[in-house]
Amino acid sequence: MRIYNSNEIKNIALLGSKGSGKTTLAEAMIYECGVIKRRGTVDAGNTVSDYFPVEKEYGYSVFSTVFNAEFNNKKLNIIDCPGADDFIGNAYTALGVTDLGLILIDSEYGVEVGTENIFRTTAQLKKPVVFALNQMDGEKADYDNVMEQMYEHFGKKVVPIQYPLESGPGFRSIIDVLIMKKLEWKPEGGAPTISEIPADQLERAQEMNKTLIEAAAENDETLMEKFFEQGVLTEDEMREGIRKGLVDRSIYPVVVLSAAKDMGVRRLMEFLGNVCPFVDEMPAPTTIAGEEVKPDAEGPLSVFFFKTSVEPHIGEVSYFKVMSGTLNAGADLENVSRGGKERLAQIYTVCGQIRNSIDTLKAGDIGAAVKLKDVRTGNTLDQKGCDYQFDFIKYPQPKYQRAIKPQNEADAEKLAGILTRMHEEDPTWVVELSKELKQTIIKGQGEFHLRTLKWRIENNEKLPIEFVECRIPYRETITKASRADYRHKKQSGGSGQFGEVHLIVEPYTEGMPEPDTYKFGNQEFKLNVRDKQEIPLEWGGKLVVYNCIVGGAIDARFIPAIVKGLMDRMEQGPLTGSYARDVRVMIYDGKMHPVDSNEISFRLAGRNAFSEAFRNANPKILEPVYDVEVLTPADTMGDVMSDLQGRRAIIMGMNSENGIEKLNARVPLKEMSSYSTSLSSITGGRSSFSMEFNSYELVPSDVQDKLLKEYAATQTED
């Protein structure tokens, strides 16, 4: 393979909903380039892309696959991304290091929720988009219907480059309105026969060509002037206008094909090579310091690692993009993200599981290295004296979580190491060791996402594991004022223990007046505040403590010990052992002993007095509540809403967005445990959702009673 410059390289993310045919298209593309002599199929499990054992087991893509194609003296680096929403993190990674999203649409199903989600991601990242209507030969394929959906979803920026003479099983030829020719294939596909447009199609083709010219001219003042003067543009001028429109996201070209029959694939690659922007034509990425870094082969060498995988028979493979400079095999670089030095003894170009050694890669190109010493996903390696550091890949928030544990507790440390490595391969697998819940939590994008992780641990690592329900991080608080006192007294020879604490508790809210007078029964308590401590809690809310001791009943040196006792109970609430929050405590009286009083005595007295007062203050349990947004087709909206209402959801609103129904609700976290699976079942996998923490709210009384009984049972067992 020859060495390519940034003005000869195009980096493309291959995107689309599950089943849209991305892996099949990738196979056809590298076949057309001569990389492989025979095309594999997904059903046979012999494609270049899906080569991991877990992908062959499940029959769908799990990881993104990097491959390159040399075509017409240009290099196309393409990253084939899984279509299932559970693996959307791969699309974020791919779009972070590529310059264009090629979005496949299944011509039998049209624009799906997954398509909408992917398009939204490209918009967030400001990446150009080309649409390819695949499976145009499908039984239910309908070009006109799909185009109507696309206009509805993505607006008038959608501009067809081609249209089929016939959709469905009879698909065999297209009219290309960019080159104004008819392309026709034999049943086996491959290279088309190119001929003039038939007379009965000429009027339609000319009208679509005019629309394309107008869309191309809008992106360049010179082209616009020429279009107004002459009414036409040359093919090269149209390509230039489309390229500029792609960079600005002012045009979304649409092509048609059948990847399975290799019809339209070569023409798609010509279009990508001739029209889509080169690396050096895209806006320059910026470092974390805000400095723009252009893909200059003569600039300082900087390499960004965007993906790590552990591959069969090889071990760890690290994928990178040369951000600046020229990378030669054997380069010694500094890891500016983690510290330390790294030698890239060998570098490779990659085509799925096919790796070819290469001596040099220039700025903008994508490659791989194996068995590096200490490089992680997201690291930047620079030559000495260069301090570029990149961090431009932002991943979606997790939507599904489970507690994970080995079947044999002795394997806990081994499991921790495996999970760390898994997170390096897929950063959307998020691992959290929860001190509060006393569980190791694994978070992901859905049930399939976590099921894949489980399969790999059990089959690749031979470590049996279990998924269990995550405990819910409840909070405890109080709703009224109450008073309690407690005397801790212990005598066992020698110095004893003595401490007595009297205190009042009440709910805390920001801006409430300072404590003054309280009445419990017939007794009134007038307080004089001597000191105040506001303690922000790590888990949210506050503990506010007032020292109202008069007459030296308790020495000031014992107040910190009492506060520690209060914090003991704030960290393990009296009701369910959950964190407590938003409580105000007034320590107003007590007793001490000149010999037996010490810090431990007052810590225990304070803790027990607080527990009693807390229980008498009409305590309540708070639960985390999340804002949930669901995107679903209109025909499933009723079922989705009914399901949410059965989960104690409060529907906050609904509307239609680009032909997709959007429903907003507020739902307790407890009820979202298996929502990913339920939503997929209800809608046939055609919906998606996102969730974000909103607040803590009081649980209903029946739920609280159930939680109290469950906690009491565990305490009895203990």
Image (tube, rainbow, N blue to C red):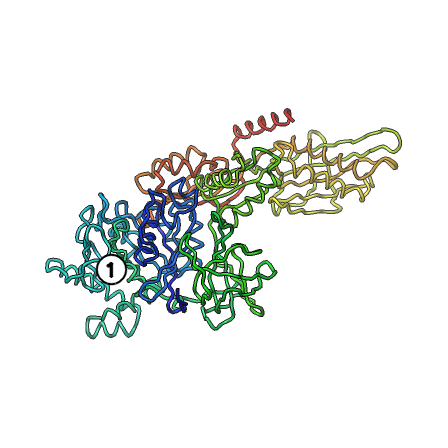
Q: Is residue 60 above or below residue 286?
A: above
Who's the residue at 69% across and 38% down the image? Answer: 568
Residue at the spot 60% in from the left edge and 25% down from the top edge = 713
The quadrant holding residue 589 is top right
Q: Residue at x 58, y 45 (%)?
A: 417
Q: Position of residue 581 (x, y in %)?
A: 62, 40
- Judge from the rendering whether residue 615 lies leftward or rightward of residue 346; answer left or right: right
Q: Is residue 685 left or right of residue 96?
A: left
- Image quarter where the C terminus lies is top right
Task: Tell me the quarter of the image containing the N terminus.
Answer: bottom left
Q: Tell me the element at label 1.
A: loop
Give the residue furthest to the left: 199
Q: Which residue is mark 1?
A: 161
Depicted 252 relative to depicted 294: above or below: above
Q: Position of residue 676 (x, y in %)?
A: 43, 39
Q: Is residue 183 visible?
A: yes
Q: Is residue 387 above or below residue 174?
A: below
